Image (cartoon, grey):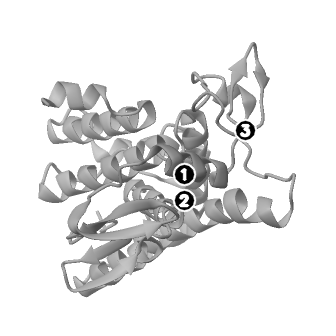
Amino acid sequence: MDVTEWYKQLPVITRGYLTLCVLTTAGCALEIITPFNIYFNSKLILYKHEYWRLFTNFFYFGSLSLDFFFHMFFLTKYSKSLEEGSFRRRSGDFLWMLLFGGAILVCAAPWANMQFLGSSLTFMMVYVWGRRHQYVQLSFLGLFNFTAPYLPWVLLAFSVMLGNSPVVDLMGMAAGHAYYFLEDVYPRMSPGRRPLKTPRALAALFEQRAMQPGAAAARVWRAGQEAEEPGPDEVEAWEQAHGEEEIMPAPEEEEPREGLRRRAFAGVGNRLGGEE
């Protein structure tokens, strides 16, 4: 598969975010724009009305270096896995998750003295992915095995060992946990309540189709009317029934999970969320 076909096959939100990140970083490298015009600055936003800074700071990942390509690789992997997995055919919900996480990071940025929040947003996606793939077995450099929910902590520890500040990663984890609690945990504690329900107007921007004829509680938009939205359990049950390819599989280890065997991951050795 060539690069063009690979790019076209990316889900819409992942493709859009990746494109904005590459164009922004390339534009800065070519001096078409400058990072000083896009970094997050609350005073410039409030007093100079430079509102674009609320969004553009998420698109810049530093100079065109090996570190940038590592960031793009991990961003694409986890974003694509979420959008094609637990957010399958619910790109509006996935965008809503990113907007929610971005809002938390923007509110925390002045106290953390951070100017670019893209790495934290990527770490948020890693956290949510881990929580929604609790039984997936991963391996770190072949040294030890762990389950997916511990992946953010392993990457955080590795980042600290390399001498980086943990603030960027911890902010992403905090945003991810806030989303996970309000979207996955709280509705189970209080049936019928869903604080982070995606606004109808946002969800209507994307074509909503039933997962499969007969799939339980599939979400369908017809003439502006919304059916029951499947929760994480229904989505996971559908994935188990129809199969789901995990990201970064390794051929050596497999973990059975209620009739579905998931392949293990080997070699997560690249740092996420390093300081710019």
Bin the neighbour count of mark 3 within 10 Å (Cα to Cα): few under 14, some 14-19, many 20 and up. some
Task: Identify which amino acid the numbered label 2 is placed on.
Answer: Leu
Q: CA distance from mark 2 to mark 3?
A: 32 Å
Q: Are marks 1 and 2 in contact (CB under 8 Å)?
A: yes
In the image as oriented, which residue stretches furthest toward the front?
259
Dot 2, crowdedness within 10 Å: few (<14), some or many (≥20)? many
- Label 1 to label 2: alpha-carbon separation: 5 Å
Q: Residue at x 71, y 60 (%)?
A: 182
Amino acid type for the residue under numbered disc 3: Ala
State the residue at coordinates (86%, 57%). 191
Q: Is residue 190 above or below residue 234?
A: below
Q: What is the x, y in percent for residue 167?
A: 43, 75
Spot the residue most to the top.
223
Q: Which mark is residue 217?
A: 3
Give the Cα distance between marks 3 and 1.
29 Å
Locate the N terminus by quadrant.
Answer: top left
Name the element at disc 2: helix
Secondary structure, mark 3, is loop
Based on the displayed image, in which of its 4 quarters is residue 224 positioned?
top right
Q: Is residue 99 above or below residue 150?
A: above
Of the image marks 2 and 3, the number of the one nearer the N terminus: 2
Q: Secondary structure at mark 1?
A: helix
Find residue 102 and name its label. Answer: 1
Q: Nearer the viewer, residue 40 or 258?
A: 258
**Residue located 43% across and 77% down the image:** 150
